[in-house]
Image (tube, helix red, strand yellow):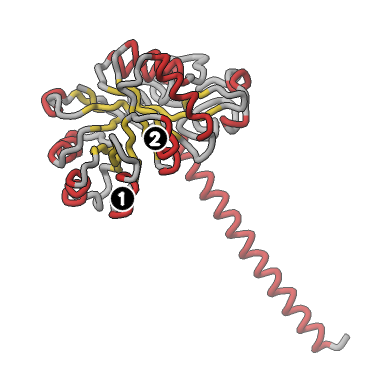
């Protein structure tokens, strides 16, 4: 091999080393960034409970987001109990179905953020999930050995405190088992009160084929398509939007109302935001820390 060829080979190797170094650097940055984001996501939120009975004055249904998550770990039996004790009109929850057919309450499809074990909720049996304890959330130290809450337990608490159950249908699977959810609601005696919500239109359409319950289509931002989709549910239907998004103006909210849709907003955690929503005609207010 000539000296010229060796130089060319050397330059090519240097190029590979540089490219490999850049890729390695980007991977490290991505991993570190991902860890930081995950850590931030898992960090318990800080809430300041506010009483606003003078503001709501019966104008809206006040919904405890994942239960009263300001005072107890979200989506747990204590959070729903505290919501009832605090006088909330309704309590919202998120449901998944275990591998052996038990509907349980969890916001995330994975247990990592809220529990001391790591698994996908739908991949485990109920007994396997019961081996985990909650280790995150508001005042978690007051709730040792706190287990996952079932849909039936949640409904029992809602019935106890005369709260409206607001059930979010998570994911895009298990729709063939929605009859089980409806059966649990019927057993609890809350059929006439229950509200179902979801970001997935097909979930709501499946529920509509089984029930004439009130349905809300969840969206980050309202647009013409979202209004059309919500209306396609027929019957008692509404749109439930992120009340903190600037694009959800009073004008677009009014357009929803004019089309005949019920109005809901989340997550409303300040008196200012609450006043703004009430002024826009929103009647379903989901909050982490505002109580009557």
- Which part of the image, by quadrant, shows the C terminus? top left
Q: Tell me where residue 169 appears, x and y as whole percent.
A: 44, 34
Residue 192 sits above or below residue 286 on the image: above
Q: CA distance from mark 1 to mark 2?
A: 16 Å
- Could you tell me if the residues under marks 1 and 2 are in contact, i.e. CB atoms within 8 Å? no
* Residue 68 visible somewhere in the drawing: no
Task: Please identify the quarter of the rendering in which residue 191 is found.
Answer: top left
> Mark 1 or 2 closer to N-term?
2
Residues 247 and 142: in front is 247
Judged left or right of residue 97, residue 58 is left
* Left-right relation of 111 to 267: right
**Which of the numbered marks, if any, corresponds to residue 208?**
2
Q: Is residue 177 above or below residue 72?
A: below
Disc 2, SS: helix
Q: Badge 1 local density, few (<14 within 10 Å), some, or many (20+)?
A: few
Secondary structure under the numbered disc 1 in the rendered image? helix
Q: Position of residue 211 (x, y in %)?
A: 38, 29
Quickly name the residue at label 1: 228
Q: In the rendered view, does 184 fall on the left or right side of 85? A: right
Q: Quadrant of the N terminus?
A: bottom right
Quarter-of-image position of residue 270 = top left
- Which of the two residues, 81 or 43, is positioned nearer the viewer here? 81
Residue 251 sits above or below residue 55 on the image = below
Task: Tell me the number on the disc at residue 104.
Answer: none
Determine the residue located farthest toward the top in the rendered image.
160
- Residue 41, percent across and down? 45, 39
Q: Residues within 10 Å of mark 2 (few under 14, many from 20)?
A: some
Q: Quadrant of residue 133?
A: top right
- Find residue 173 and report its horizontal and vertical position in percent: 53, 38
Number of numbered callouts drawn: 2
User: Residue lying farthest right?
Assistant: 1
Q: Depth check: 47 or 236 in front?
A: 236
């Amino acid at each position: 091999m000539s000296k010229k060829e060796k130089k060319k080979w050397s330059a090519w190797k240097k190029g590979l080393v540089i490219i490999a170094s850049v890729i390695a650097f980007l991977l490290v940055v991505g991993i570190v960034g991902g860890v930081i984001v995950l850590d931030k996501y898992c960090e318990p939120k800080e809430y300041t409970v506010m009483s606003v009975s003078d503001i709501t004055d019966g104008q809206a249904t006040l919904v405890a987001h994942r239960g009263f998550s300001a005072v107890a770990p979200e989506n747990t039996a204590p959070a729903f109990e505290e919501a009832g004790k605090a006088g909330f009109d309704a309590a919202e929850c998120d449901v998944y179905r275990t591998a052996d057919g038990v509907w349980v309450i969890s916001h995330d499809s994975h247990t990592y953020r809220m529990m001391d074990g790591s698994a996908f909720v739908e991949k485990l049996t109920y007994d396997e999930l019961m081996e985990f304890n909650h280790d995150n959330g508001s005042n978690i130290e007051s709730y040792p050995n706190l287990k996952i809450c079932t849909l039936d337990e949640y409904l029992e608490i809602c019935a106890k405190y005369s709260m409206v159950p607001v059930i979010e249908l998570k994911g895009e699977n298990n729709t063939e088992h929605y009859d089980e959810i409806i059966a649990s609601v019927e057993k609890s005696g809350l059929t006439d009160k229950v509200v179902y919500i979801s970001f997935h239109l097909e979930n709501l359409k499946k529920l509509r084929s089984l029930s004439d319950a009130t349905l809300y289509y969840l969206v980050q931002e309202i647009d013409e398509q979202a209004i059309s989709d919500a209306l396609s549910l027929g019957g008692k239907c509404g749109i439930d939007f992120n009340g903190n998004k600037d694009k959800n103006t009073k004008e677009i909210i009014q357009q929803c109302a004019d089309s005949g849709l019920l109005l809901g907003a989340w997550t409303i955690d300040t008196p200012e935001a609450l006043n703004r929503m009430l002024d826009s005609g929103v009647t379903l207010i989901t909050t982490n820390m505002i109580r009557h």
